[in-house]
Image (tube, rainbow, N blue to C red):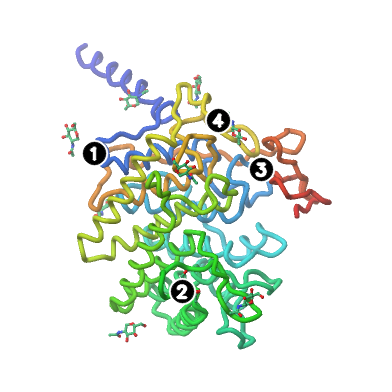
Amino acid sequence: MHTKHFVLVIFLFSTLILPVYSHANNSCSLEMFGNDTGAHWACATQFALQSNWFPSPIAGLFSYLIWNGFDGFWQNGAVLEPMTNFMAYTNSTRYISVIRSSYRQLYSLLEAYGPYPSFDDMGWYGLSYARIYEVLGDQEFLQSSLDIFNWCWQTGWDTTGSCYGGFWFDNNVNAKQTITNVEMFQLAAKLLRHTKDKTILKKLNQIYEFIIKTKIVNETTYLLSDGIFLENCTTTYNYGPTYNNGVFIGGLVEVYKITNNKTYLDLAQKIARATIAYSTNKTTGIFTEYCDPNCDDDGIMFKGIFVRNLRYLMDALTDQATRDEFQTFLEFNVKAITEINMCEKIPICKCNITFKDGPPYYNVSGPVFSPDWNGPFTYGAPMQQTSALDLFVSSIKPDTKCNGKMCSYDPYYPPPQPLTCGSKPCPAPEVCCEYSPYTSYTCCTTGQKCIKGLFI
Ligand SMILES: *[C@@H]1O[C@H](CO)[C@@H](O)[C@H](O)[C@H]1NC(C)=O
Ligand SMILES: *[C@@H]1O[C@H](CO)[C@@H](O)[C@H](O)[C@H]1NC(C)=O
Ligand SMILES: *[C@@H]1O[C@H](CO)[C@@H](O)[C@H](O)[C@H]1NC(C)=O
Ligand SMILES: *[C@@H]1O[C@H](CO)[C@@H](O)[C@H](O)[C@H]1NC(C)=O
Ligand SMILES: *[C@@H]1O[C@H](CO)[C@@H](O)[C@H](O)[C@H]1NC(C)=O
Ligand SMILES: *[C@@H]1O[C@H](CO)[C@@H](O)[C@H](O)[C@H]1NC(C)=O
Ligand SMILES: *[C@@H]1O[C@H](CO)[C@@H](O)[C@H](O)[C@H]1NC(C)=O
Ligand SMILES: *[C@@H]1O[C@H](CO)[C@@H](O)[C@H](O)[C@H]1NC(C)=O
Ligand SMILES: *[C@@H]1O[C@H](CO)[C@@H](O)[C@H](O)[C@H]1NC(C)=O
């Protein structure tokens, strides 16, 4: 009789615990991360990202069905990296199925983009896949990353001999932007480190030569210009976007890991300090993108990509004082965005959350963050949530470990929902644009026009 009673108690307990698994509760606590605040914020922020927008960042992208996610190809690739870093920095496996299911072969990525991807957009998949390989050891991610790099090289590297080569922006071959070249620099270095393939070494040197000789990196300020003028092979003196600097820093760290030559690490530190100084709001001391508070859906992701790469630099440093300096910078911004740029009203639907492409599958969850880290909170959407996630993840202290059942939290994610323009899925004032022959659509941002299924 006593035994029976005992069994009943156990049964009740498991019933009570169930709601935790069904998204009633964000399943993150300080204790599970040994009281690391950054890890706790990252956990809750990722939970909200996955609940509010589609639980798989790229599932809908490849099915020609619609999901309520980023509505942008490159962001779907780029968000996989902070998700992977979260696992690496906390030794957990939260959302591992989502990460594993992001695997696509090159041809599939090309098809999803259509009609012809720009090389920088493909680069985010290359970088994320290489990082997934690094953390999970899955060979197919390494192979796909190599295929992406090789395709970009064969299709996008300027072989005409003018202006030290360099990657074209896209197949219109009428621009050379910094972002493409720093992405391919980091990607080549990482792939070289993992494969030791000498043919990649030669390409890596060529990309480095292009970046240095065109003086994209300003020799006195250590800021990176956004691109070059093709006419005379000189920089455009446009020093705004922080992700250029961040991705180049990440590349220099990779080259340092290969060569053990401190020169690259020193340069990376100079660029990091210069970027932080240049992109800090002088009044608030908060990290601020050049386009804040009016960044578009691309610019909103940049700050996150910078801090993601700053963390790679921090982990390579042997000098504790410099590491602490950058850690203080990250924690200052963590404190700032949680105090002035966050919304977690009860119920959370009182926060202004934008759902492009239909309503969420799960109940909405907080905290949500807005684009400008100076606040105040304006609206939540997956791009700014990713930047906040990147910041929290980067601030996780070394040796943090996740403990407990929730460290392997990996909820079911449903297939994308088939919506049409008839479902009125686009937030005002965006126009819904039908694709043909698919009964699918995209939301046109301000300035784009929907002409026969193409948005231009
Ligand atoms: C969503 O919220 C409603 C009402 O608050 C609740 O009844 C329902 O169980 C929740 N669904 C999930 C999947 O958590
Ligand atoms: C969330 O789950 C934890 C762990 O099961 C529990 O202690 C906490 O009370 C729950 N919070 C809410 C708001 O349900
Ligand atoms: C976390 O903080 C709680 C409350 O202050 C404390 O009881 C616990 O020992 C701490 N855990 C660790 C791993 O430091
Ligand atoms: C991470 O966790 C696994 C077990 O899940 C363990 O084997 C491994 O040693 C841990 N790694 C670190 C760096 O703590
Ligand atoms: C580097 O920056 C300095 C200071 O803004 C500027 O005077 C110089 O022209 C820049 N050099 C190049 C090569 O862009
Ligand atoms: C290079 O070309 C651009 C665009 O035509 C021009 O604005 C710039 O002044 C030129 N720079 C030099 C150093 O000639
Ligand atoms: C380190 O790299 C720099 C820049 O490429 C180079 O000039 C220097 O010779 C290298 N040092 C060593 C010891 O290889
Ligand atoms: C910088 O901070 C000041 C003072 O709070 C504020 O007025 C300004 O809007 C901020 N700039 C940006 C881009 O957020
Ligand atoms: C809510 O967010 C939208 C952007 O999606 C913005 O246009 C609107 O002004 C916001 N509303 C409020 C009350 O802040």
Q: Amino acid at mark 2?
A: Ala
Question: Is 337 in front, or is 344?
Answer: 337
Instruction: Write the residue at 82% across / 51% down.
Output: 451
Q: Quadrant of the N terminus?
A: top left
Residue at image mark 1 = 35
Which one is earlier in the sequence, the residue at label 2 or at label 3?
Answer: 3
Q: Amino acid at mark 1?
A: Asn
Tell me: 451 left or right of 5: right
Q: Is mark 4 within 8 Å of ligand 9?
A: yes
Q: Is residue 186 above or below residue 433?
A: below
Residue at image mark 2 = 188
Cα–Cα gap, marks 3 and 1: 39 Å
For label 4, the SS is loop
Residue 245, position in %: x, y?
Answer: 45, 64
Q: Return the residue found at the far bottom.
A: 161
How dense is the environment of label 1, judged by Cα within 10 Å: few (below 14), some, or many (20 and up)?
A: some
The quadrant where residue 154 appears: bottom right
Q: Quadrant of the C terminus?
A: bottom right
Which one is earlier in the sequence, the residue at label 1 or at label 2?
Answer: 1
Cα–Cα gap, marks 4 and 2: 41 Å
For label 1, the SS is loop
For label 2, the SS is helix
> Are the residues tagged 3 and 1 within 8 Å (C-beta)?
no
Mark identifier at residue 66: 3
Tell me: 231 left or right of 89: right
Q: Is mark 3 within 8 Å of ligand 9?
A: no
> Are the residues tagged 2 and 3 within 8 Å (C-beta)?
no
